[in-house]
Image: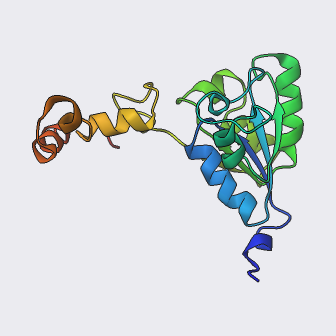
């Protein structure tokens, strides 16, 4: 039997991301034994909407990417919600967030704020298009990435994928 499922035992992770990238990252941490708290907005993560459901009507995609986690709903836009979130963050080792750049700062939950309260916190931001480039404020989803890279061009327009990808790579992406 593998000891991998206890490799990160004792590590406390807060996942305040949605859909797939962040939840998949924190799922790997949970699979290795980390204690993961998945924080969702009051209406829940958008992954609760698509896909098949079990016999009780629960969404299977959401259950799959959040297996082994404690899931709670906190309204980060309210003072009470931020206070509750900060209580969790004060004792966390890792925070995973997937908002657009600047959202955590607007919520008063940015790296500097959290780091002052918890100097050992590792703050992981997942951004679809970098934090300062021309698409920084664009919502990033798999379909967007595929389209931008030309991966959907052949399926829709009949353009060969190599031609589409060659043109897509000309898109200006800002890097510092």
Colouring method of the image: rainbow
* Quadrant of image for the N terminus: bottom right
- Determine which quarter of the picture holds residue 19: top right
Please name the residue shown 77% across and 35% down the image.
39
Q: Please indicate whether residue 167 sits to the left or right of residue 3 in the image.
A: left
Q: Position of residue 118 (x, y in %)?
A: 81, 47
Q: Could you tell me if residue 173 is visible in this image?
A: no
- Determine which quarter of the picture holds residue 105: top right
Residue 156 or 95: which is nearer the viewer?
156
Q: Position of residue 58 (x, y in %)?
A: 75, 34
Q: Position of residue 117 (x, y in %)?
A: 82, 41
* Quadrant of image for the C terminus: top left
Residue 106 or 47: which is nearer the viewer?
47
Q: Could you tell me if residue 86 is visible in this image?
A: yes
Q: Please indicate whether residue 85 sits to the left or right of residue 53 in the image.
A: right
Q: Position of residue 124 (x, y in %)?
A: 62, 48
Q: Please indicate whether residue 174 sits to the left or right of residue 93 in the image.
A: left
- Determine which quarter of the picture holds residue 11: bottom right
Please name the residue shown 45% across and 25% down the image.
137
Please name the residue shown 11% across and 42% down the image.
160
Which residue is situated farthest in the top direction here? 78
Please name the residue shown 78% across and 54% down the image.
93
Tag count:
0
Which residue is situated farthest in the bottom direction here? 1
User: Is 73 above or below relative to 163?
Assistant: above
User: Is 61 above or below relative to 57?
Assistant: below
């Amino acid at each position: 039997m593998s000891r991998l499922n206890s490799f990160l035992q004792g590590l406390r992770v807060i996942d305040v991301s949605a859909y797939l990238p962040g939840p998949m990252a924190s799922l790997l941490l949970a699979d290795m034994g980390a204690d993961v708290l998945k924080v969702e907005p009051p209406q829940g993560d958008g992954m609760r909407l698509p896909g098949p459901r079990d016999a009780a009507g629960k969404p299977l995609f959401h259950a799959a990417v959040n297996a082994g986690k404690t899931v709670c709903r906190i309204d980060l836009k309210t003072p009470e919600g931020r206070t509750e979130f900060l209580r969790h963050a004060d004792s966390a080792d890792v925070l995973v967030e997937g908002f657009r750049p600047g959202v955590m700062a607007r919520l008063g939950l940015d790296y500097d704020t959290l780091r002052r309260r918890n100097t050992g916190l590792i703050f992981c931001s997942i951004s679809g298009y970098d934090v300062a480039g021309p698409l920084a404020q664009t919502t990033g989803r798999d379909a967007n990435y595929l389209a931008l890279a030309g991966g959907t061009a052949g399926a829709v327009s009949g353009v060969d994928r190599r031609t589409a990808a060659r043109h897509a790579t000309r898109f200006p992406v800002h890097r510092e």
